[in-house]
């Protein structure tokens, strides 16, 4: 049937199908609250179902501002827990491109150099993109792009313990520097920006990234979005 009404209905139904060709799930919460862990668990477990190249994880940390023009002394002074430290314009642009079915080059970031590396990681369009990062839910443009959002509500003392261990073992820090940074910026910025962004989450996950029921709920919801 080629009546104008049917053509319009067909276009509208194509559009609504397109809108779910790329499901974007956002996971926010304090530093070391288990965001990366829950993201990689859902990624691994869904990969088997949706297909190897159909699901990907994007870490907000890859989109910290490039600081290669600054000296090391200057880089250390940056407040890495403030929204201004991040290039959300580039992140939004990349998500938009992926939604349009185009590939992007995700920046690589060095926590010990406090800047972007020259290398990038190519990413092809996906059916499912899991975004994870501390400040994702503070940005209305990113919230708009998400089909569902999660806030990891892990107690701050647990986060601090984990951050201490991790930053010393994996991010080239001293215990002293982790504690100074925690008091100067990490905790205050959590109170000012991250905690208040919890109101935008659809799901609030207590205890951390190993919360089995939260993982299963997320997987089931993503599967449902993919079917609709
Ligand atoms: O993985 P996680 O969410 O903990 O990463 C975010 C944290 O990384 C922020 O709390 C920020 O303080 C820290 N960061 C840092 N140095 C950088 C970039 C980020 O300590 N150069
Ligand atoms: Mg992380």
Image (cartoon, helix red, strand yellow):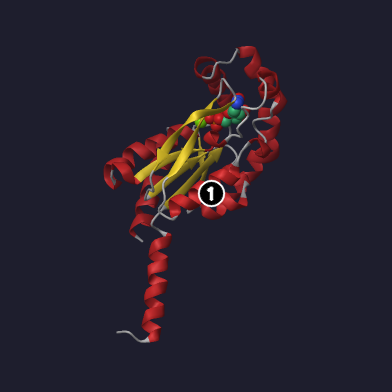
Instruction: Examine the rendered structure and indicate whether residue 211 appears above or below residue 91.
Output: above
Residue with the mark numbered 1: 93
Image quadrant occupied by the C terminus: bottom left
Residue 95 percent location from the top left of the image: 49, 49
Dividing the image into four quarters, tell me where ligand 1 lies.
Answer: top right
Question: Residue most toward the bottom?
Answer: 3
Residue 100 percent location from the top left of the image: 44, 56
Image quadrant occupied by the N terminus: bottom left
Residue at 59% x, 50% y: name it: 200
Residue 5 can be seen, yes or no: yes
Instruction: Examine the rendered structure and indicate whether residue 175 appears above or below residue 66.
Output: above
Residue at 68% x, 38% y: name it: 84
Q: Looking at the rendering, which quadrant does residue 225 occupy?
A: bottom left
Q: Secondary structure at mark 1?
A: helix
Residue at 43% x, 61% y: name it: 19
Residue at 36% x, 82% y: name it: 6
Using the image as rendered, state which of residue 47 and residue 54 is in the foreground. 54
Q: Residues within 10 Å of mark 1 (few under 14, many from 20)?
A: few
Is the residue at mark 1 in contact range of ligand 1, meaning its CB lies under 8 Å from it?
Answer: no
Using the image as rendered, state which of residue 129 and residue 101 is in the foreground. 101
Using the image as rendered, state which of residue 35 and residue 153 is in the foreground. 35
Residue 102 percent location from the top left of the image: 42, 51
């Amino acid at each position: 049937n080629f009546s104008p009404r049917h053509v319009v209905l067909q276009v509208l139904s194509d559009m609504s199908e397109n809108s779910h060709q790329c499901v974007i799930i956002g996971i926010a919460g304090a530093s070391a609250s288990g965001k990366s862990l829950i993201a990689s668990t859902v990624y691994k477990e869904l990969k088997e179902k949706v297909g190897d190249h159909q699901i990907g994880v994007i870490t907000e940390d890859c989109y910290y501002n490039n600081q290669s023009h600054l000296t090391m002394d200057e880089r250390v002074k940056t407040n890495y827990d403030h929204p201004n430290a991040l290039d959300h314009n580039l992140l939004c642009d990349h998500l938009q491109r992926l939604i349009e079915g185009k590939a992007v080059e995700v920046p690589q970031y060095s926590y010990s150099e406090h800047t972007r590396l020259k290398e990038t990681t190519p990413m092809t369009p996906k059916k499912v993109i899991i975004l994870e990062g501390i400040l994702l839910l503070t940005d209305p443009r990113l919230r708009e792009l998400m089909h569902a959002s999660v806030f990891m509500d892990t107690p701050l003392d647990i986060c601090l313990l984990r951050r201490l261990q991790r930053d010393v073992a994996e991010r080239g820090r001293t215990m002293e520097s982790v504690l100074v940074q925690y008091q100067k910026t990490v905790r205050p910025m959590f109170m000012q920006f991250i905690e208040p962004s919890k109101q935008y989450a659809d799901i609030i996950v207590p205890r951390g990234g190993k919360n089995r029921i939260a993982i299963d709920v997320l997987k089931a919801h993503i599967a449902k979005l993919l079917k609709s």
